[in-house]
Image (cartoon, rainbow, N blue to C red):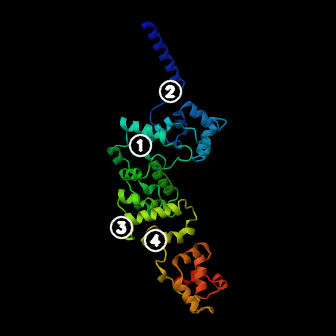
Amino acid sequence: MKKFFLVLFFLISIISCSQSDSGGVLKSSPISINPLVNFNSFYNELESSEQDCLLSEFSAKDKMTIYVSDNSIPSQKLSGCLGENTNYRILQGLFLVRNIELNSQERECLTENSLNEKFDYLGETFGAPLFTYSLGSLFCLNQLSREKYKLNLENFIDNEPIVKVLPNDINSLECIAIKTSNQTSMDALNSIYLNSGIFPVQIISLLPNLIDCTTLPKELLDSGIDEKSSICLSEKLALNFSSLGDNFLLEIPKIILDIESCDIDSEKLLTFFGIDLPSSNEDLEISEIIENDSITDERFICLSSELELSDVLEFLYTGVLSDNALEVANSCGISKDEIENLDLSEIIG
């Protein structure tokens, strides 16, 4: 019987070796090769099934290599082919190029996170910073590794005020993630990364957690941002402006009303983020153009004093008069035709 088990063990060993030779056994060494620099070497590190998947979009390997050379990735033609183990190896490699060699505990944590945080390295996430697709992997690092890993957010986010608000260390990011969730924090960071020049609704939505986990710039604190007001504004933005796009300026008047309703100085807050606006109704004055106009009379002085800042801003950004502006005009004795022919931008001094 003992000989039988020895023979069985020998046969299993042979089968295992043959699987290893045929590429059936998963590789475990880190992949630190940039596919744009040397795609052939990167390709050779992949499992055979992943290589076949990539080749399925091309008639030959050399055509795939030329495609990668001539067309920068991410690419839909190369997406969806890399498995969890390869993602794990790539994450190891991304840390390795930063001179961070993971210990056994960090590697075990990274393995678990590569199963939970799916990302498409050659597809939609290629070239994006690590925190936009695998934030949990950063949290696998021990304190020594965290000190070696510099976030350098300014390299990824082209907006100085936003970079000043975001924490630049992993401990603070982890604190925020614990208070929300990894996915919520990742979604917010991804939105900020992709739309860094757009109104920072995601950052303002995270303000309550930022206050708890990091130090905000003095300019923001001076605008009235504190624990209570930040929660108020975060809740309003989450309710009304959860998916602001490129046309966020159309929503500025409503955003101003939300900011002011939370006892925050809208001018200071928006100016900090590079959006310069008049600060109050006192900034709205009759211009010389209107004063010299034949239709100028007490009715238009009434209009200039009664209009809300948001009404003028809405007209500036949309070219459309708000219902409130029409009501104010009517109460001041101005007909609908007269107000519709008036350029409200001319009453800003």
Identify which residue, 269 or 47, lies in the foreground. 269
Query: Disc 3 and disc 4: Cα gap in Å?
Result: 21 Å
For image coordinates 41% across by 54% down, the residue present is: 152
Pointer 3 or 2: first along the chain:
2
Q: Amino acid at mark 2?
A: Val
Q: Amino acid at mark 4?
A: Ser
Name the quarter where the N terminus is drawn. Answer: top left
**SS at badge 3:** helix
Q: Position of residue 64 (x, y in %)?
A: 62, 39
Query: Disc 3 and disc 2: Cα gap in Å?
Result: 55 Å
- Which numbered disc covers residue 218? 3
Query: Disc 1 and disc 4: Cα gap in Å?
Result: 45 Å
3 vs 2, front mark:
3
Pointer 3 or 4: first along the chain:
3
**SS at badge 2:** loop
3 vs 1, front mark:
3
- Which numbered disc covers residue 95? 1
Residue ID for mark 2: 25
Pointer 3 or 1: first along the chain:
1
Query: Disc 2 and disc 1: Cα gap in Å?
Result: 24 Å
Q: Could one spot residue 159 in this view of the protein?
A: no
Please say if 19 is above or below 245. Answer: above
- Which numbered disc covers residue 136? none
Characterize the local packing of mark 1: few (<14), some (14-19) or many (20 or more) Cα atoms within 10 angstroms: many
Q: Position of residue 47 (x, y in %)?
A: 54, 32
